[in-house]
Amino acid sequence: GLPFVYEVVRCRQLAKCQAFLNLFEAEGCRMIELSCGLHDKYAASTQFITHLTGRVLGKQRVESTPIDTKGFQSLLQLVDNTVKDSFDLFCGLYRFNANSTAQLESFTESLAEIKLDLRRATAAGAGADAAAACLSSLAEGIKESKTVQVHALTKQKEAEGKQVISLCVGEPDFDPPAEVLQATARAATETTPPLTRYTAVAGTLELRKAIAGYLTTEKKTPYGPEHIVVANGAKQAVYQSVLAMCQEADEVVIPTPAWVSYVQIVRMARARPVLVPCAAEDGYVLSAESLAAVLTPKTKMIMLCNPSNPTGAVMPEATLRGISALLMLPQHQHIYVLSDEIYERLTYD
């Protein structure tokens, strides 16, 4: 009763070919003549999606409960059958069949559509207004920065005529030096081409050369301007880096206490933040041992803010070398470090 799928092409001896096919038909096989293209289409919509569903549920670690339904028991059987098969078989169904790529995209889109249907129905049932219901799940899940909230409150109190001492934003209460202001004004009016026009996406060549020179002089790291991208502030640079490197299901390790935006940035990139508490008695410094305890094959990036915001902790060289040695191990060489050094010139020890 098993299917025997075949296609006759470039056959010069039809009699021998038919005799070969007759052998399998005589043994009770269901003889199915299909073109390769149609076979691959069917395989993607049956075999690949079966293995895909089983492996997705396997990642969910579904297990039997006292209230199992027959439908759920069939899903458990599906998981058992598919996960026991080699991953190479599953990968082959995807790698060597272009239709499987479209099937995977369709599966992902269908899941997103179901999530959207549930969100809309829930919002409607809760009496949410139309504007709130139309927000994307990404926007809906992002929380406003606490420092921005407090900063807005201080401005409100100041507008009300109240005296406020604000410690929420690292913003000097004095202007930049006159030389800086004058140079900025000249750059806007005297530069050729004027800097009031669009610049190169990565930043002006002159600025990138200056940054490369700074890194070479101060840190002995020989980067050229072609290795440098200028962003509109550190938050954009961090976000773009995480967005470029991380995918869904990737994990990003964040030592805490941490800058409030790190977690939200990781979530905006649809990755998963993994928080590692750093204790006061350890100087709020991440140790190689604490880091090793949370690293998994899913770990894609580690965020190191040195000196730290908000603790001000500076990581000793020995600690950095220990973390470096850990990440050089073969099982961890897929992990990237995002080094946020925005406060490096504010250390005076």
Image: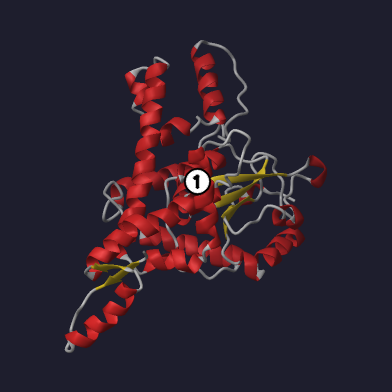
- For the point 29% across and 65% down, the residue is 40
Q: Residues within 10 Å of mark 1 (few under 14, many from 20)?
A: some
Q: Is residue 47 left or right of residue 31?
A: right
Identify the residue at the far front of this view.
26
Q: Is residue 58 left or right of residue 207?
A: right
Q: Nearer the viewer, residue 234 or 285?
A: 285
User: What x and y, as percent, mark residue 335?
Assistant: 58, 61
**Above or below for 327 versus 265:** below
Q: Nearer the viewer, residue 60 or 229?
A: 60
- For the point 55% across and 67% down, the residue is 216
Residue 19 showing in the rendered view: yes
User: What x and y, as percent, mark residue 192?
Assistant: 27, 56
The residue labelled by disc 1 is 75
**Among the 4 quarters of the image, the one containing residue 13:** bottom left
**Above or below for 127 versus 84:** above
User: What x and y, as percent, mark residue 98?
Assistant: 30, 64
How many discs mark residues in the rendered view? 1
- For the point 41% across and 54% down, the residue is 50
Identify the residue at the far right of this view.
281
**Which element type, helix, strand or loop, lies under badge 1?**
helix
Q: Can you say which quadrant of the picture contains the N terminus?
A: bottom left
Residue 176 showing in the rendered view: no
Q: Amino acid at mark 1?
A: Leu
User: What x and y, as percent, mark residue 327?
Assistant: 65, 64
Q: Is residue 2 left or right of residue 235?
A: left
Coloring applied to the structure? secondary structure
